[in-house]
Each structure stands twice: as structure tokens, then as C-alpha cells.
Amino acid sequence: MPRATVTSKGQITLPKPVREALRISTGDRVAFRIREDGVVELQPETVDVLSLRGILRPGVHGVTLDDMERAVADGASDS
């Protein structure tokens, strides 16, 4: 059974077999879930890049410099 020691800062290093089982590496995030029976579950919070497909709306364009200049000019003329 893999084991870890808690440092004075409350940190642990996950043993290699645990990292491999969770398929996590440096920089990955993990979540802890505390069950009612006191058991703590550790789950990776990795995101598959393909799951992000479609999150951005195509065809959304920013404001052009001309649009900004017109808006500033319109605002200045209103005062």
C-alpha cells in the first residue's frame, strides 16, 4: 500500500503508483471528496482537450479601432 508523509506545511507527495493510477502528472489538479463515512476520495480534475470542442462561438468578432474611435467621438459630442 503506497504511503505519504504530511509536511509541516500540510503538503504530501503522491507516490508514483498513485499518480500512475490516476494518470496525473506535474501541474495537474486533483479534487478531494469527503464521504459521510469519513473516507476521502481523490479524483483527478484533468480535462480532455476534445471535450472543449465547441465551447467558443465562431463568428464572434471584437470591436475595431474605427468602431472605438466612432464611439468616443459620439460620446464626446453628447456632452
Image: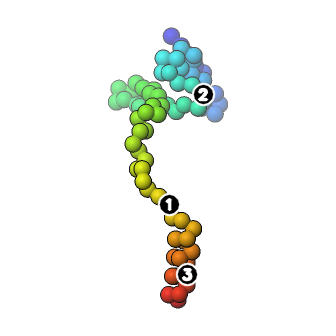
Give the residue number, with chain letter if any, for mark 2: 26
Q: Position of residue 47 (x, y in %)?
A: 46, 33
Give the residue number, with chain letter if any, for mark 3: 73
In this view of the protein, can residue 69 be seen by the observer?
yes
Q: Position of residue 71 (x, y in %)?
A: 51, 76
Q: Is residue 77 left or right of residue 51?
A: right
Which dot marks residue 62? 1
Of the two numbered discs 3 and 2 in the rendering, the one whose residue sits closer to the viewer = 3
- 17 or 59, which lies in front? 59
Q: Quadrant of residue 35?
A: top left
Q: Amino acid at mark 2?
A: Thr
Q: Amino acid at mark 1?
A: Gly
Q: Position of residue 43 (x, y in %)?
A: 44, 27
Alpha carbon separation for disc pair 3 and 1: 19 Å
- Position of residue 73 relative to residue 44, above or below, is below
Q: Compare marks 3 and 1 and give the one earlier in the sequence.
A: 1
- 13 or 62, which lies in front? 62
**Callout 1 environment at 10 Å: few (<14), some (14 to 19), or many (20+)?**
few
Of the two numbered discs 1 and 2 in the rendering, the one whose residue sits closer to the viewer = 1
